[in-house]
Image: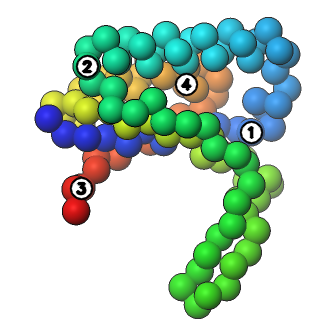
Amino acid sequence: MKDFLFIYKSDYAAMQDRTAEEAQAMMKRWMEWLEGIAAQNKLIDKGNRLYNNGKIVKGDGIVTNGPYMEIKESIGGYSLIKAESYDEAVEFAKGCPVLFAGGNVEVREIDPM
């Protein structure tokens, strides 16, 4: 069994245009999707949403504000799952609600240290 990181990316501006009812319906879809993975004992950590502000730290010690709102696609959150293979992890990702809102899921295998 391997561990995978799902990184959820979407257009933050589009997310802001949702009504409260749409946001609530989307949260319900997320919970149902994650519960489906958990029911298979494959959810390590449901993860969290991320704020849209942050800092960029560069190798030369320079710290800047970021990520920038002008960037169309931003990282909105993450989850950790376990799967037998990349193929199984990708199959889980295909059901992610972010896909139905114009976003995408980056699937990355975790390389234990």
Residue 41 tag number: 2
Left or right of residue 91, residue 94 in this image = right
Which residue is label 4 attached to?
99
Residue 27 position, x and y percent, is 63, 17
- CA distance for labels 2 and 4: 23 Å
For the residues labelled 4 and 1, say whether their Cβ atoms are less than 8 Å apart. no
At a point 61% along the width and 88% down the height, the residue shown is 61
Which residue is label 3 attached to?
111
At a point 48% along the width and 36% down the height, the residue shown is 47
- CA distance for labels 2 and 1: 31 Å
**In front: label 3 or label 1:** 3
Q: Residues within 10 Å of mark 3 (few under 14, many from 20)?
A: few
Which residue is label 1 attached to?
12
**Which kind of residue does numbered mark 3 sit on?**
Asp
**Which kind of residue does numbered mark 2 sit on?**
Asn
Secondary element at image label 4: helix
Left or right of residue 105, residue 4 in this image = left
Residue 16 position, x and y percent, is 82, 31
**Which kind of residue does numbered mark 1 sit on?**
Tyr
